Amino acid sequence: MTRKTAAPGGPATAEGPPAVALRGATASLGGRPVLRGVDLTVAPGETVALLGANGSGKSTTIRAVLGQVPLTGGELELFGTPLARFRDWQRLGYVPQRSTAAAGVPATVREVVAAGRLARRKFRPLGRADKAAVRHALEQVGMDDRAKDPVDALSGGQHQRVLIARALAAEPELLIMDEPLAGVDVGNQEALAATLREQVDQGTSVLLVLHELGPLAPLIDRAVVLRDGQVERVDNPDRLHDLACHPHGSEPAEAAPAPKIETGSLT
């Protein structure tokens, strides 16, 4: 993992190719253009928030970064490697939008979180370090006391915390999160902010889709605002306080199909 180092007289910096380099990206869903030339870069150790109104293309952008939505034009590189040649998916952790479709999944909380280690282990049995990573991830999101419970016994907010723990268990270099604050109460939002601060301090790059910045505002280096599938503007940290109070009016967050919690690999 790329780590930040302290530059003389300045803040910590990180070296290496961008974790994400999206250039002129276009994409369609159901024959309808959704992305119209999106440029997006996430540098090593940088935290970038995607903001925008309903239907602006936020979730589609991150799904394109994950390879879930094929580009019809433009280029995508992950850690300096073109998507077509990229194989190191264990370097990414993904938190989808809050799931409400986990009923009936025959898995415990610990088993779901342990799935975050599968890509790293290449489906071999978990070792001591893997089990420690799973335990630490559960502690980070305050779900260690529910480790043995079935996931279908959880509330919506608890589901979200399990998804976050699953991503953290992978110890990713790039953490991608789609509305991670949805369904999470204020106290746990602040706990999540502290957890992300720890990840960022270790050099993790973070790409977030947010409706409101909330307690995550101090962590964000840049806010990229989308409108109609295009980048409308990029806001630097000096403007983030205003965005935290008025992110994009009163329009609802972008809708997207709720993914199911699965125990297999994210890729």
Image (cartoon, rainbow, N blue to C red):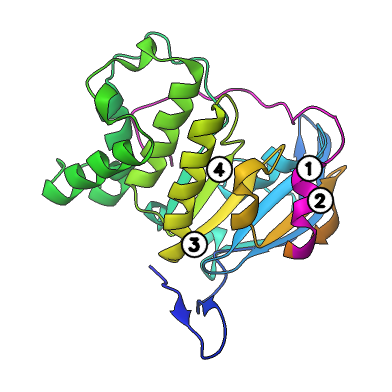
Can see residue 115?
no
Under circle 1, the secondary element is: helix
Tell which tag, 4 or 2, sits nearer the viewer: 2
Tell me the distance, in whole angstroms, between the alpha carbons under discs 4 and 1: 21 Å
Q: CA distance from mark 2 to mark 1?
A: 5 Å
Q: Which residue is mark 3?
A: 85
Looking at marks 4 and 1 on the same chain, the residue that comes earlier in the sequence is marked by 4
State left or right for residue 167 relative to residue 8. left
- Residue occupied by mark 2: 242
| Amino acid on which disc 2 is placed | Asp
Residue shown at the point (59%, 56%) measured from the top left: 219
| In the image, farthest residue toward the bottom | 8
Q: Which residues are magenta?
A: 238-267
Residue type for callout 4: Met
On the rendered image, what quadrant is the N terminus found in? Answer: bottom left
Magenta part mainly helix, strand or loop?
Answer: loop
Provide the residue designation for mark 4: 177
- Give, as a three-letter code, the residue at label 3: Arg
For the residues labelled 3 and 4, say whether their Cβ atoms are less than 8 Å apart: no
Say above or below: 139 vs 37. above
| The magenta stretch spans residue 2 | no
Q: How many residues crowd mark 2 within 10 Å: few (<14), some (14–19), many (20+)?
A: few
Q: Position of residue 28 (x, y in %)?
A: 77, 39
Q: Residues within 10 Å of mark 4 (few under 14, many from 20)?
A: many
